[in-house]
Image (cartoon, rainbow, N blue to C red):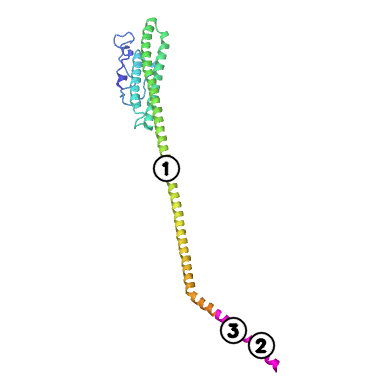
Amino acid sequence: HEQYLSIKMSFQDVGKPGSSNRRGGAPLRSGFGEQSPSNSGFKSDLPEVSELDGGVFAHIGDSILQYQRNLAILQNIAKSVGTKTDGAVLDTQLRVQIDVIKQLGSRIEKQLNEQEKNLPTLSRTEAAKNRAGLVKLRRDYQHVQSRFKNLCLTTKQKKEFAIAQQREKTEQVESRNAESESLKLQIQQQIEQDKVAEQIMKERHEEIIQINQGMRQVNDIYKDLANIVGSQQEDIDQIDNQMEESKEHAAAGLKQVEEANIKADQNCVIS
């Protein structure tokens, strides 16, 4: 702010007491009233150039000083670009202040151009004096205007850089969130797979238990059959013996029957 206000403009010598470029010794007047440089804007009440008297250079000089003050205000606002306070409000302040400076610059350009157009209507001496004053005013205005353009350019670059950084941060956050969501999904899928595997293992374990129980039952059945067979072996042996004895008795009985038949046949022949 101070580096702008501390510049001594060459036009400040124009219109001072004793200067040949100021007619009538009229005091310097500002067309902007008593506005503080801390304000972010202003309302111009500069009269049209055609209404100005001999103090026209003083009015143009005051306009350039006001242009310089508003440039300092813009510089202070631009310092917040890319900081935590950057946002929609700051963008509005920048836009409004730039519009104000551009409007003031257009007014200064108009005043300078109209004064240059008036030079041919003056005498050669007055025209030379006024031309020298206009050269000083235009040089100082162009100097401040150049600072304004440079500030607009650097502010734009700073804003673009801040936007790029914010975009990069946003993309990084989104990327981390996406990675986090992907990791959560992978973990969830792994948990589901573990649950399925655990359920399969549990079912297989239950099937193995059932198979083992069935095998034990079959083994018990074989054991019971073996016990039954072992307990009935004696009865079977007795039956076998009885069958052998019956066979022997049957054979003996058959033999007796045959012998009886033979005797019966012999008796029948004798008779």
Regarding residue 72, the answer to whether it shows in the image is yes
Of 195 and 122, nearer the camera is 195
Tag 3 residue: 252
Q: Is residue 177 above or below residue 206?
A: above
Tag 1 residue: 183
Distance between the alpha carbons at the discs numbered 3 and 2: 15 Å
Q: Nearer the viewer, mark 3 or mark 2?
A: 2
Taking the image as shown, residue 248 lies to the left or right of residue 169, namely: right
Q: Position of residue 38 (x, y in %)?
A: 31, 26
Q: Position of residue 253 (x, y in %)?
A: 60, 85
Q: Nearer the viewer, mark 1 or mark 3?
A: 3
Q: Nearer the viewer, mark 2 or mark 1?
A: 2
Under mark 3, the amino acid is Ala
- Mark 2 in CB contact with mark 1 (< 8 angstroms): no
Disc on the earlier residue, 1 or 3: 1
Q: Is residue 223 magenta?
A: no
Q: Which residues are magenta?
A: 243-271
Distance between the alpha carbons at the discs numbered 1 and 3: 99 Å
Q: Position of residue 232 (x, y in %)?
A: 49, 75
Distance between the alpha carbons at the discs numbered 2 and 1: 112 Å
Q: Position of residue 254 (x, y in %)?
A: 62, 84
Kindly give the residue lying farthest to the top in the view shown: 124
Residue found at x 46% / y 54%:
200
Of 247 and 164, nearer the camera is 247
Q: Quadrant of residue 33?
A: top left
Q: Could you say which disc has been placed on residue 262 in the image?
A: 2
Q: Is residue 262 magenta?
A: yes
Under mark 1, the amino acid is Leu
